Amino acid sequence: MMKTCLYIIAIVGFITVLSSCSNFQRHDDALRIKDEAAKKYYRHPTEEFMRDGSTLHGTVVKVQVTSIPDSCPVTPETHFTKKTSVVFLDHKAKAKPENFEIIPIEDVQLISDLFDMPRNDYNNINIFENFNSPDEMRPAREVPVDTIEIDTCCPCNCVPWELSLALDLNLKCVERNFKWYFLEVRGAYAMYSDFYSLTDERGRDSYPFEIAAGVRLGENKEWGVGAAFTTGIKTYNSFKSLDYTRPVIMLHGRWQSSKDKFMGLCMRPFLYGQFGFSIDKLSMSLMDFNFNTGCDNCKKYLKGLENNGQLPGVDFSVPLSFGIGAGIDIPIVEDLDLSFDLGFRSIAFGEAVAIAGFDNVPSNRRVNMMIMRFGFTL
């Protein structure tokens, strides 16, 4: 069962990493269209929403120069007809292959024809302006120029020039938008050894659910401080062989890398640390034993017996728990990560024992475990 879970998590994580790296890097470009051609662009060709056909708002991916031979076979004397186009993605369109528009350069109003600009190596056909500067000449951006030769002499003669929109669409990771707060929602798998009795040790596992929330800090919001609650693991009361669920509440701190790539993949490594206590009935009784002054005489008597070694296996210390771990956040949309981590956790909790003439004397016991968590981070 455990191996199956690990395989599923690994496959889902791998697919998510790949998909998170396939997100198009958008820019805020303005593509001016000549007045006589504007009517062709008022409606998006595939998603069919309406827009301003005279100035298209979106991302100019590149300028594509396609060379097509005028005759076959191709020889050193063959003349090539060149067709220049602008590859464009509207800001409202999803970054799917069918949504990239191939706009003939004849329909484009180049800003170099409107303003006196120094000429570059491509005679400024690859310079486009930013969309949001209406009152002055807008900042300009140079885009790549891709030259492709189409072999129309190929026997199949089946490659239309539009399909030469290459696979180099400048893909990059999801650009994460971190809020001032964080929220972690996790399912977990924990493995540990437990005592059914004082001498009977058994291997166990549990599937707790965990949620953590807090504020993000730092220049890049890479730090987080807050609180975490977990539904807890199952453990025995080793003195009486009874089974209990031990929910835990802890302070929760996290750090994540400010870089959006790790080992060449679209993911951010993170570390976390936790410190707190169990809040089940027996654990709270042990806390009450340590801090409530209502029974000082009996506490002095019992602690005296403990110090003299007359209460074997009994521990009156405060049940403090802690945990540490490391994992990866994989951005799937700008406000959400898919998260996976592996950690160590030490859970202290209360037990009850009838001893020294008392019933239900509280005692502390600790379980150490490996815990694997899988879920989402806002």
Image (tube, rainbow, N blue to C red):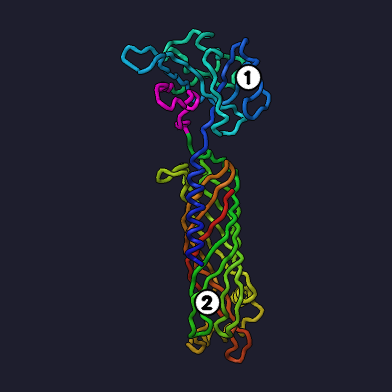
Q: Which mark is residue 131?
A: none
Residue 316 is drawn in which quadrant? bottom right
Q: Which mark is residue 365?
A: 2
Seen in the picture, residue 49 relative to 33 is either above or below; the reply is below
Q: Which residues are magenta?
A: 145-170
Of residues 64 and 275, which is closer to you in this image?
64
Residue at the far right in the pictured view: 50
Q: Residue type at mark 2: give it.
A: Arg
Q: Position of residue 323 (x, y in %)?
A: 50, 63
Point out the frontmost of discs 2 and 1.
Answer: 1
Q: Element at badge 1?
A: helix
Q: Residue at x 65, y 75 (%)?
A: 281
Residue 304 seen by the camera = yes
Residue at the far front in the pictured view: 155
Q: Element at badge 2?
A: strand
User: How many numbered discs, if any?
Assistant: 2
Q: Which residue is mark 1?
A: 41
Residue 148 seen by the camera = no
Of residues 330 and 362, which is closer to you in this image?
330
Q: Position of residue 12 (x, y in %)?
A: 51, 52
